[in-house]
Structure formats: structure tokens, C-alpha cells
Amino acid sequence: AYAAPIGDANGMEVNFVGYGRSDGDDDWAFSLRLYDERGSNVFSQNPNYSEATGWNEEQLGGTVPPAARRARVMLWCERDSGFNCSAWYDDLSLTLTYPAP
């Protein structure tokens, strides 16, 4: 997984939006994590698994801790049956914004 660098996080907000779906047998989810310079987790929103077969929008986010330096979005699939984990993801967006002055 790739971790995007964050500069000065003072007052910054992070927002992730993405769409996911499955074949109905397997669970899918997103998670968002922020890490400090040493790689320690300083912010985490863990997955809420879904078996939805239609495209569902998921949103994660919040205030970025001052120590955060990297952001990582993870795509999860949990196989419930069969040989493959059948989940699909689309239109992923990760934004970092400062509050208006």
C-alpha cells in the first residue's frame, strides 16, 4: 500500500470518499490511517464491512493530528465462500484541506 506524505498538519481535515460493492457473498470495506514520522498510527478509522451488491458510497475522515505525516487508505475484502474474494472499488478520493482563514 502507498502512503501519501502530509506536510504541516496543523488544523488540517482529511476526507476519504469511495465506492464499493461485492457479489453478495464476500464482505468489502475501506479504512483510513494516519501515521507520524516514525510510522506510528496516530489516527485510525477502521472498516465497516458490507456485503452490498450495488455501488455504495463510504466516507471516512476527521481532524488530522498535528503529528501526522502520512495518510494511507486500505481496501479490504473478506472472503466468505469460494476461491476468490469478489469485491470492486471505484471513484476513490482522498483530500486534505486547511480550514478557511
Image (cartoon, rainbow, N blue to C red):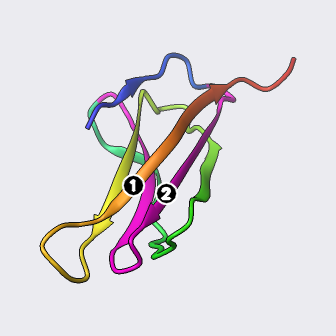
Q: Is residue 27 above or below residue 45?
A: below
Q: Which residue is mark 2?
A: 20
Is 15 placed left or right of 19 in the picture? right
Tell me the kind of residue under disc 1: Trp
C-beta proximity under 8 Å, tags 2 and 1: yes
Quarter of the image with the N terminus is top left
Tell me the kind of residue under disc 2: Gly
| Range covered by the magenta-colored residues | 10-37
Q: Position of residue 40 (x, y in %)?
A: 31, 43
Residue 79 or 69: which is nearer the viewer?
A: 79
Which structural element holds mark 1? strand
| Number of disc labels | 2
- The quadrant in which residue 70 appears is top left
Residue 26 or 62: which is nearer the viewer?
A: 26
Residue 88 circle label: 1
Chief SS of the magenta region? strand
Q: Residue at x 47, y 32 (%)?
A: 67
Q: Position of residue 31 (x, y in %)?
A: 43, 55
Q: Residue at x 27, y 32 (%)?
A: 38
In this view, the residue farthest toward the right is: 101
The earlier-in-sequence mark between 2 and 1 is 2
Q: Residue at x 61, y 28 (%)?
A: 96
**Pointer 1: residues within 10 angstroms few (<14), some, or many (20+)?**
some
Alpha carbon distance from label 2 to label 1: 6 Å
**Pointer 2: residues within 10 angstroms few (<14), some, or many (20+)?**
many
Q: Is residue 81 above or below residue 55?
A: below
Is 60 placed left or right of 46 in the picture? right
- Residue 24 covered by magenta stretch: yes
Which structural element holds mark 2? strand
- Residue 15 covered by magenta stretch: yes
Is 83 placed left or right of 53 in the picture? left
